[in-house]
Image (cartoon, grey):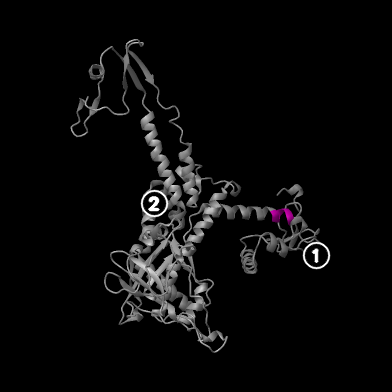
């Protein structure tokens, strides 16, 4: 195979030659896997219909245009990313990273540089929405190949319909698992080598080409490390294809569309009241009777038509629509000419089925149905009044954030290694301790925390008479107030400082039973009942001070 376009970062430590497995690597990200040749990006579904990843992404984008589906997507994106005039939508959390302050500052600076390359502060909503709808996102990390130590120069977005991730075996299928005659030693097996790369085609990836084909019709093969690839995490295990979170809503959306269209047709056909004219034609022959019926109909029928082009209203008698009146002949001997009325539909105001399928669509998108059309409003009451669907939705958005942050993780890894801030070995150790803190705007989480705090304080107040008898103070702080060792130490230091500064009174000071105020210094001898002495400013002698009676001052 020819040299791949782009760049590659060498693996930290390649696996030992004695580390073997017959199972090919699989990231569970829907990567196309080929033995040696084949059509890429294609599969056959359960109905035997030929499908492609190209068609799936096209279907997802068509779904996103539908108003109800678009409203649900906007709820998810707005919940996941919060735009603030002062703060970035996402920040780096290095509190758990065991590194020097200098390294942490460099990592934060490089992360800010990556956000600037993406213009994430302005395009965060668009980037996240594209990732959510397509179920994947691609970025080309452009560097100066002569000066890779300068890091990433540009992050260029790639349409998901023009890119494909491929995992291919270098050896032919005939050489797979070739067994020698040396015994049962696993090392006697010859395992195929796997290479990963991306294929980019400006015209789009269609399932019409061979994976080993060359030329512009196939596309450009790009090295794995030169592309940032982030998926939704949903994989159809039967077909091995990456899915979007919109995939579950395909059937629900089609049902909603169909029921809405049928409802419109039904109401148009049954809404008007139509009249039935029975015209007495006597003993006229058939041809004469038809002519007479036509003459009568044209005489009394008046169809006014509004011309949208000219703004005129004219009488158009040439056409008869199905919504107009009926004219029927009646022979002699009948009841003569008669006019009756055909009533319109009686249940035209019922939309229960529409509401059902709308709720079903929202549930398939993991969005609470209470958010549909602003139903239910927003409750700032107790957390017990918060809907369980909202809590589930919050957890779902949290999982989406975790998955989406893999994009930042890959970009940050490439930038730090290229600029020699960290080595690939160091990154493997540090990567698990680098977190991404998204800006929150979820009032339900705040309400929940506030309610839990109030309940803990109430329980602690209830248990206060039993401190020293059945429970220790340390037990109350740890088990009821849920304070950690670090929080206990921190709070003790702060309380001691505030008491020393006189901000708060000392809770351990003796209390005067009559006044309820902390008592001053006790007189010599330690008798609490002895009268307090205060200096006589004129004679500079101590005089007795009578305590006020009844708490009067």
441 sits left or right of 205 in the view: right
Instruction: Give x and y (percent) for residue 103.
Output: 46, 78
Report the residue at 39% width, 64% height from top: 42
Q: Which residue is nearer to you in this view: 331 or 101? A: 331
Residue 287 visible in the current orientation: yes
Q: Which residue is nearer to you in this view: 344 or 363? A: 344
Residue at far bottom of view: 182
129 sits left or right of 514 in the view: left
Instruction: Give x and y (percent) for residue 81.
Output: 44, 58
Q: Which residue is nearer to you in this view: 99 or 530? A: 99
User: Does the magenta portion include 441?
Assistant: no
Please, what secondary structure does the residue beneath circle 1 have? loop
Q: Which residue range is magenta in the image?
A: 459-463
Q: Which residue is nearer to you in this view: 266 or 103? A: 266
Separation of marks 2 and 1 at Cα, in angstroms: 84 Å
Query: How many badges with numbers are in the image?
Result: 2
Q: Which of marks 2 and 1 is nearer the N terminus?
A: 2
**Residue 257 lies in what quarter of the image?**
top left
Report the residue at 48% width, 55% height from top: 441
Name the residue beneath numbered marker 1.
Answer: 526
Q: In this view, does 419 lie above or below 394?
A: below
Instruction: Give x and y (percent) for residue 538.
Output: 68, 60
Q: Which mark is drawn over residue 63?
A: 2
């Amino acid at each position: 195979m020819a040299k791949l376009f782009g760049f590659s970062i060498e693996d930290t430590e390649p696996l030992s030659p004695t580390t073997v497995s017959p199972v090919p690597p699989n990231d569970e990200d829907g990567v196309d896997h080929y033995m040696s040749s084949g059509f890429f990006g294609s599969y056959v579904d359960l109905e035997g219909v030929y499908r492609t990843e190209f068609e799936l992404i096209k279907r997802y984008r068509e779904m996103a245009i539908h108003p109800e589906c678009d409203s649900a997507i906007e709820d998810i994106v707005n919940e996941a990313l919060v735009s603030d005039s002062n703060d970035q939508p996402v920040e780096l959390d290095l509190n758990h990273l065991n590194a020097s302050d200098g390294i942490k500052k460099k990592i934060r600076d490089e992360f800010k540089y990556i956000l600037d390359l993406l213009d994430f502060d302005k395009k965060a909503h668009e980037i996240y929405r594209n990732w959510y709808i397509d179920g994947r996102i691609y970025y080309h990390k452009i560097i100066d190949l002569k000066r890779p130590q300068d890091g990433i120069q540009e992050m260029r977005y790639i349409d998901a319909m023009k890119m494909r991730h491929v995992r291919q075996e270098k050896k032919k299928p005939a050489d797979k698992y070739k067994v020698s005659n040396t015994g049962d030693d696993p090392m006697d097996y010859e395992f195929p080598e796997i290479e990963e790369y991306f294929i980019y085609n400006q015209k789009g990836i269609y399932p019409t080409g061979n994976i080993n084909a060359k030329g512009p019709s196939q596309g450009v093969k790009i090295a794995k490390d030169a592309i940032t690839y982030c998926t939704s995490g949903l994989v159809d295990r039967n077909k091995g294809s990456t899915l979007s979170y919109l995939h579950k809503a395909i059937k629900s959306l089609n049902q909603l569309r169909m029921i809405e269209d049928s409802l419109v047709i039904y109401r148009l056909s049954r809404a008007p009241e139509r009249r039935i004219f029975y015209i007495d034609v006597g003993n006229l022959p058939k041809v004469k009777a038809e002519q007479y019926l036509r003459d009568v109909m044209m005489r009394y029928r008046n169809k006014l038509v509004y011309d949208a082009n000219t703004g005129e209203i004219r009488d158009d008698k040439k056409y008869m629509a199905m919504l107009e009146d009926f004219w029927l002949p009646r022979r002699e001997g009948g009841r003569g000419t008669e006019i009756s009325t055909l009533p319109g539909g009686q249940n035209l105001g019922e939309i229960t089925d529409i509401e059902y399928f709308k709720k079903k669509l929202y549930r398939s998108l993991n969005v609470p149905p209470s958010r549909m059309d602003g139903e239910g409003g927003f409750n700032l009451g107790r957390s017990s009044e918060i809907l369980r669907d909202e809590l589930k939705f919050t957890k779902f958005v949290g999982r989406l954030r975790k998955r989406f942050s893999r994009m930042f993780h890959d970009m940050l890894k490439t930038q730090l290694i290229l600029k020699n801030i960290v080595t690939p070995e160091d990154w493997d150790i540090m990567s698990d301790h680098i977190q991404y803190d998204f800006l929150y705007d979820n009032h339900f989480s705040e309400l929940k925390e506030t309610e839990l705090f109030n309940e803990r304080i109430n329980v602690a107040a209830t248990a206060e008479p039993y401190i020293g008898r059945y429970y220790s103070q340390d037990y109350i702080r740890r088990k009821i107030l849920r304070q950690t060792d670090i929080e206990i130490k921190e709070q003790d230091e702060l309380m001691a400082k505030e008491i020393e500064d006189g901000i708060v009174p000392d809770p351990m000071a003796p209390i005067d039973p009559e006044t309820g105020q902390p008592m001053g210094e006790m007189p010599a001898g330690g008798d609490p009942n002895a009268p307090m002495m205060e200096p006589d400013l004129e004679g500079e002698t101590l005089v007795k001070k009578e305590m006020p009676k009844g708490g009067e001052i």
